[in-house]
Amino acid sequence: MLYNYRYLNFKGSIIINSDQTLQEQFALFYKEHSPATFEEAVEKFAIFGGVGWGKVDTTKPAIELIKDLILSDYRYIRTDVGELTGGAPLYHAVLSGIALGDGKTHSAFKRAGTDKDAGERIVEELVERGIIRVAKANNTFTSWSENESVDNKLFFTTPFLRFWFAFVSPIFKGIRDGDYKEIEERFANRESEFYNLLFSELSQALLQVAFKEDTLESIGSYWDREHSFDLYGRTKSGKTIVGVTKYVNAKVKKSTLTQLQTEAEKAGIKADIFVIVAKKGFSNELKSMKGESLKLFTLKNFKSLVE
């Protein structure tokens, strides 16, 4: 099941128009802005997705668009975001903790400097406001007991808000004063890493479309105390899918599959199908192994998300 996302529109204030899946948001962004490649589509969607901006020239460098569309209107957008979130500084600290970390509740609360009880109350409020969603850890295949606590993960429901709380909100004073040096440096250092989470979420949507004969009953990510996988799902026939996403500027080699197989075995997961989704494709050796038990996808396959 795909989770609901919000479509926002800046017109004096942020307006929540409707519930949409991430795939629907991505398809709308693609239709509105006509990116030339799916690399452009993914990267610009990770920054501007879920918000009506008028026309975004996706051929321009990301940092140039960030300056033109976000930083130049910082004061107005900050007011809009504050109205959406409630504006409490601790709420914004938790949101930045989610955006800058691995999304787990413990690390988000630690980054925000708040305790678990207060953090959980804030999460509940932010979920009610439609800003984030909560995903629970899965202990189906691991040896840890039901009594052991494993952190839930928190995900933004709108790509733009994740960008805002990762790169803008934490350093608002400099941006407010027109000094963009720090955000330029931060974005340059974390750009590829930042795109990968959105790439993984879109890859989950891709698998929903790609598995046509044996459709998916569930798809998401997997984590426990020691292991994590970008892609984890079950087909209607009961097959288990485990996968990894690689948003890197190099072809993925057989070693990635070997590592994925090893990690699945360590986690106690008997995978029937391994999936790799890669930005730049695969080595010839790995492509030769493609079959019923190994599915390979690239950005070209994202076309099915917008058709």
Image: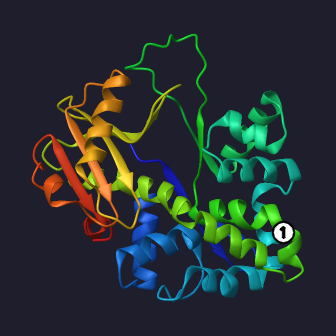
Q: Position of 4 compared to 288: left or right?
A: right
Instruction: Pick the quarter of the image with the N terminus.
Output: top left
Q: Which residue is mark 1?
A: 172
Give percent across and percent down for residue 220.
Answer: 41, 42
Label 1 Cα crowd, 10 Å radius (few <14 / some 14-19 / many 20+): some
Image color mode: rainbow
The residue lying toward the viewer, choosing from 155 and 15, is 155
Q: Quadrant of residue 203?
A: bottom left
Residue 216 lies, with reference to residue 295, above or below; the image says above
Spot occupied by residue 129 in the image (x, y as percentages of width and height): 70, 50
Residue 233, x across and y down, in percent: 32, 37
Q: Is residue 185 shown to the viewer in this render? A: yes
Q: Is residue 82 visible?
A: no
Residue name at image x 43 percent, y 68 percent = 26
* Residue 190 against residue 220 in the figure, above or below: below
Image quadrant in which you'd find residue 63: bottom right
Left or right placement of residue 217 versus residue 214 in this view: right
Tell whether 103 sits left or right of 107: left
Q: Quadrant of the C terminus?
A: bottom left
Residue at (36, 85) in percent of width and height: 36
Q: Nearer the viewer, residue 178 or 74?
A: 178
Residue name at image x 83 percent, y 33 percent: 118
